[in-house]
Image (cartoon, helix red, strand yellow):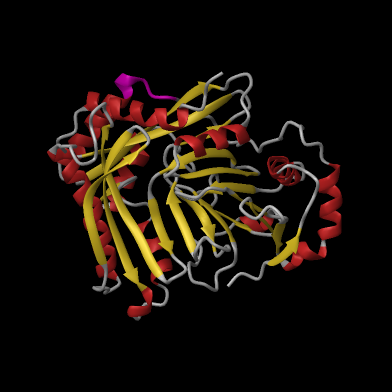
Amino acid sequence: MSSLQRIAWRPQLPVADRLRRLVALALTSGRPVALWRLPGAQHPRLCLSLKVDAAYVGLPPALESTAPAGFAFFPFRDSDHNPPLFFPADLFFDLARPEEILVSPSAAARLPELRQRFAALPTATELPWHVSQQPIPIPASQAQYEALVAAGVDAIASGTVQKVVSSRAVRRQLPSNFDALEAFEELQERYPNAFVSLVSAPGVGTWLGATPEVLAEITEDHVFRTMALAGTQPLLPNLTPATAAWAHKDLEEHAMVARYIVNCFKQLRLREYDERGPRTVVAGQLLHLRTDFAVHLDQVPFPTLGTDMLRLLHPTPAVGGVPKQPALDFLRRHEGYDRAYYAGFLGPVNLPDVGVARLYVNLRCLQLRPQEAILYAGTGLTIDSDPAREWQETELKLRTVGAILHE
């Protein structure tokens, strides 16, 4: 398990001010920072890294209990522009335990220096969030996006792919009084059942989001979990999960994702898994179809199942398509922009009270720029997809995180 040490920490500051100063401690020295709130939790957690170069990694992290403690932030597709990241937890702050802080051995040796720097930071300072150096995506017009959807449907009809997930980026002006930490707090209040995150790293920029989709979890009681989350409709007045009816297109889209997960288990020759669903769930102002999968690791001879499944699953058919490689090839040729960390994955690994790993697909997210935000949304296409309907679905999804961009 983690080698983090618990240190008593009682500065005479309100908890919110301590959090802001800890974030400033990382940002003012050019270090990465990750802040998140788990679904259903009451308090967020914070991970700071002291070495920038330790954040850049190759393969997805190992998800076994011997894995290092930290926070994973991986792109949709690995590239020199969008490297996969793992932030070692040199400092870990759980706001549920504000009187202590957890430190790595290297951070413990520097604790007097870090305390001095922390105390010297002004609480009200404007935080210097990291800014991406990559080009800003060019937004697609409605006509352009509908043409992309039509091209996807044609590819399905020709047999090139069975499903493809198209997406688009939009630009929104930031309000004059926008504060990323306050926006993070608002997302927590709006979406109590989502994984809410604020991640900032050199070269990568700053990302804020509230995602409903688990990619891979390993709980403290040694259960591996993943889910198929596909199929979307608006949560209209007087509509509940129990009364929602689903179109054939949504049922087919969901079934493809669920079958893909089962095929991943089969590739590993695993037969002992639990499957529950599909059922209708609420995510913000949307309804989705969801099927949950679980494997009790103590009952199967697969010690690296979590790591193996993570590498098979990402990117899932819920964000890429089926078959995986032809769908990704289609997106590279036709989508017209770089998704960067949208539709990648993120989450804590081997940190106290979070289980061994809690990784989520980076959906319902935005990237912060100095004067604007870049928002992302996508839709799963099947042979029955209608371009106008798919455009409208992206509009609905953009409202989830876009709701915080108000004066």
Q: Is residue 268 above or below residue 208?
A: below
| Residue depicted at x 42% and y 71% | 222
Please state the horizontal and vertical placement of residue 378, each as a whole percent of the image. 34, 35
Residue 261 versus residue 123: which sits nearer the camera? Answer: 123
Q: In this view, does 142 lie above or below 312?
A: above
Q: Does residue 200 appear to the left or right of 279 in the view shown?
A: right
The quarter in which the C terminus is drawn is: top right
Residue 335 in the magenta stretch? The answer is no
The quarter in which the N terminus is drawn is: bottom right
Q: Does residue 224 appear to the left or right of 356 in the view shown?
A: left
Please state the horizontal and vertical placement of residue 265, each as a whole percent of the image. 28, 67
Please state the horizontal and vertical placement of residue 74, each as a whole percent of the image. 50, 51
Residue 110 versus residue 30: which sits nearer the camera? Answer: 110
Q: In which quarter of the image is residue 20?
A: top right
Residue 404 versus residue 230: which sits nearer the camera? Answer: 404
Q: Is residue 331 above or below residue 179?
A: below
- Looking at the image, the residue that sits furthest to the bottom is 301
Q: Does residue 67 appear to the left or right of 388 in the view shown?
A: right
Q: In this view, does 281 lie above or below 114?
A: above
| Residue depicted at x 39% and y 55% | 215
Q: Does residue 289 appear to the left or right of 66 in the view shown?
A: left
Q: Give the range drawn in magenta.
A: 139-144
